[in-house]
Image (cartoon, rainbow, N blue to C red):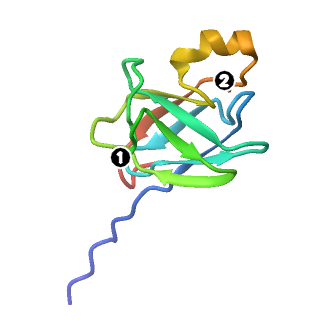
Amino acid sequence: MAEAAPAKHEAAASSISLGISGAPVPLSTNASLSGGITFVNLPPTPVKIWTWDATGTLANIFVGQTGNYVSCQLGSNGPFSFNSSVALNQTLGFQANSIPPSEHGEAHRTDVASGVRGTIKITSMAGEK
């Protein structure tokens, strides 16, 4: 009898905790291309997670994402899977904000809170460690 081939498995999603102000934990994380990201949004408020591609341009990096951000309620959100524009060895950016990054200059004058920008490095494919 032939032995069954090893089962293929998706990599586990990487988890990032963040909020409307302060730095995400971890500030920089490694992720598998097939594993995606889970954002854990801390109190006090829901946030938008703005995303940048490897060139530093605001972009939709997750499957189904529109408007260059994903909305996150309090608690665990995701996992968000990377779309086909994301590739191995790229470093992507993300930041929790209540407004678009283009409005930050005005926001600083009106004390709108925004989080610290973090990075996600794509370090492996499916099932690799």
Q: Amino acid at mark 2?
A: Val
Above or below residue 73? Residue 2 is: below
Query: Of the numbered discs in the image, which one, if any, rests on residue 125?
Result: 1
Q: How many labels, in total?
A: 2
Residue 4's mark? none
**Residue 27 at x, y percent in the picture:** 64, 29
Q: In the figure, is residue 80 to the left or right of 115?
A: left
Q: Residue furthest right?
A: 44
Q: CA distance from mark 1 to mark 2?
A: 27 Å
In this rendering, is residue 6 above or below 31? below
Residue at far bottom of view: 1
Q: State which quarter of the image contains the N terminus.
A: bottom left
Query: Who is closer to the viewer here, 28 or 72?
Result: 72
Q: Secondary structure at mark 1?
A: loop
Given residues 106 and 56, the one toward you in this image is: 106
Query: Residue visible at 33% across and 36% down?
Result: 86
Image height of 31 relative to 103, above or below: below
Mark 2 element type: loop
The local crowd at label 1, few if under 14, some if 14 to 19, many if 20 or more residues have their Cα within 10 Å, is some
Select label 1 or label 2 by which is in front. 2
Q: Percent position (x, y) of residue 94?
A: 53, 30
Q: Residue at x 36, y 47 (%)?
A: 63
On the image, numbered disc 2 is attached to which residue? Answer: 116
Check disc 1 and give the amino acid type: Met
**Label 2: few (<14), some (14–19) or many (≥20) C-alpha neighbours in 10 Å:** some
Please tell me in which quadrant of the rendered image residue 4 appears. Answer: bottom left
Q: Position of residue 71 (x, y in %)?
A: 55, 44
